Amino acid sequence: MRFGLSFPNFGAFAEPSTLVDVAVRAEDAGWVSAGPEAYVA
């Protein structure tokens, strides 16, 4: 089974450098995918 990580795209996570840091750390920890949540209205 593979797992992905989803995180909000507002607040502290709205900063591009934070998104990159989270994605790199997730990959290093073995997560298959990491990306911001997407909302469709």
Image (cartoon, rainbow, N blue to C red):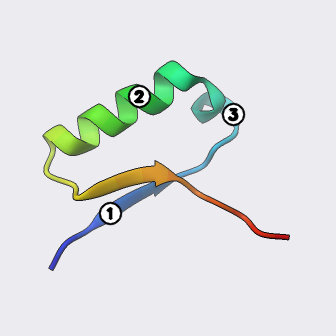
Between disc 3 and disc 1, the foreground one is 1
Answer left or right for 2 relative to 35: left
- Residue drawn at x 58%, y 34% as measured from the top left: 13
Residue type of the residue flagged with mark 1? Gly
Question: Which label sits on residue 35?
Answer: none
Residue type of the residue flagged with mark 3? Gly
- Residue 17, relative to residue 9: is it above or below? above
| Crowd around label 1: few <14 · some 14–19 · many ≥20 (10 Å) | few
Between disc 3 and disc 2, the foreground one is 2
Q: Residue furthest top?
A: 17
Residue hosting label 2: 20
Give SS at disc 2. helix
Dot 2 and dot 1 residues touching (CB under 8 Å): no
Question: Which is nearer the N-term, disc 3 or disc 1?
Answer: 1
Name the foreground residue: 40 vs 8: 40
Residue type of the residue flagged with mark 2? Val
Answer left or right for 38 relative to 1: right
Question: Which label sits on residue 11?
Answer: 3
- Residue drawn at x 25%, y 68% as measured from the top left: 3
Question: Which is nearer the N-term, disc 2 or disc 1?
Answer: 1
Answer left or right for 31 relative to 14: left
Name the foreground residue: 14 vs 40: 40
Q: Quadrant of residue 26?
A: top left
Residue 17: % across, % down: 49, 19
- Residue 18, relative to residue 25: is it above or below? above
Residue hosting label 1: 4
Question: Which is nearer the N-term, disc 3 or disc 2?
Answer: 3
Give SS at disc 1. strand
| Crowd around label 3: few <14 · some 14–19 · many ≥20 (10 Å) | few
Dot 3 and dot 1 residues touching (CB under 8 Å): no
